[in-house]
Image (cartoon, rainbow, N blue to C red):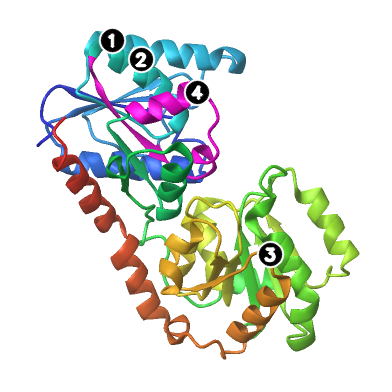
Amino acid sequence: MSLNRRSIHLWIPNIFFFKGGIQVYSAFFLQALNSFNQNTDYHIFLKHDPCQSPEFSFSEHNKFHFAGNWYLPLRTLAFASQIFGYGLWQRPKLIIATHLNFTVAAYWLKRLTGISYWAVAHGVDAWNIQRPALQTALHHADRILAVSGYTRDRLIKEQRLDPAKIAILPNTFDSDRFQIAPKPKHLLERYQLTAEQPVILTVARLDMKERNKGYDQILLALPEIRRHIPNIRYIIVGKGSDRPRIEQLIDQLDLQDSVTLAGFVPDEELSAYYHLCDVFAMPSQNEGFGIVYLEALACGKPTLGGDRDGAIDALCGGELGVLVNPEDVSAIAQTLIAILQGEYPHPLLYQPELLRQKVIDIYGFEKFKTTLQELIQTIDI
């Protein structure tokens, strides 16, 4: 059924001034909706953004509502009042929440008005849910879009949801921003590297609450890697509260000459870091999907992820990269050594153009748009 009556409300944490996975996904989601629903007005409610960024350009059919100007302790109440009030007033034909926590309000609106609602399940937000109100809201959602099969399977198992209610709409990426290119001279000079020097790269938030990104395991694997590849350099891009502990671990392992903490890197410079590396590695354990894997693959880089989370989806079960036990430091070390020495038995890793094309075919924005359009058209709302 075509969505051509009245309006759709989108409830989003933020998209303009923070670039985490949910924010990037939400921006692509809105862009996709605009591309094939020209006769629909979208009211976008943003909890944490105070205003729209000039970097983004959206359709004239988009009306933004901001709660980010409210003092943080009052913001949740202000946002809830906004989405609930506009819902009662405008009676949209569909509400889409790109964070599961918002579905509690959608559930009550549905009870009062019959408005259908969808929710997007990303990663840790969807795992081990204990709140009864949120559990109820998930069971009454008309559709749940999971970013990975891993997240879908956990929701089905943990919340006993109807599998038919959950569809997969994987993350996507901007293939124009991430392309194949030589190692940038300015980064080689900045970090005093030679063009031939092998580089391992991780891009992740260094958050004390998210220590399962896998950078610890790579640091622990570096002494063994260094025995085979003495001039190896490991670069970690990202900032956060876990940096002091990481610095301490680097000192304990005597890796000062082999590790570079690059800190925060602006979006416009990120692709250069992918170009700089010879392998992208993030053997995580709690990743809902991992857009960074797609970005690295689009730059033609061999990519390593963990075999315990959404990286399984991002790397297509090993078709696009290498999956390892994220708790096995020895396996991580041996796998990275093999990849860097050109000996890993996966020919696609060493065919950058083909690697790039495959990730675009599977996870590019055109595929994302097609999948979302099919999902909407198959449900009578």
Marks 3,1: beta carbons within 8 A = no
Q: For the residue labelled by badge 1, is the local secondary structure a helix, a strand or a loop?
A: helix
Residue designated by label 1: 112
Comparing 363 with 56, the one in front is 363
116 drawn magenta: yes
- On residue 132, the disc is 4
Measured Cα–Cα span from mark 3 to mark 2: 42 Å
The amino acid sitting under disc 2 is Trp
Amino acid at pointer 3:
Glu
Q: Quadrant of residue 180?
A: bottom left
Are the residues tagged 3 and 4 within 8 Å (C-beta)?
no
Spatial CA span between label 4 and label 1: 19 Å
Query: Foreground mark, 4 or 1?
Result: 4
Residue 63 in the image, given as x and y percentages of width and height: 29, 24
> Does dot 2 land on a helix, a strand or a loop?
helix
Where residue 85 appears, as percent x and y from the top left, is: 34, 9
What amino acid is at disc 1? Leu
Sequence-first disc among 3 and 1: 1
Callout 3: SS: loop
What is the distance, in whole Å, between disc 4 and disc 2 at their CAs? 14 Å
Q: Earlier in the sequence, mark 3 or mark 2?
A: 2
Q: Identify the magenta region.
A: 114-140
Is 69 in the magenta?
no
User: Which sits earlier in the primary sequence, circle 4 or circle 1?
Assistant: 1
Whole-number angstrom distance, CA of label 3 to CA of label 1: 48 Å
Residue 327 is tagged as: 3
> Disc 2 marks which residue?
108
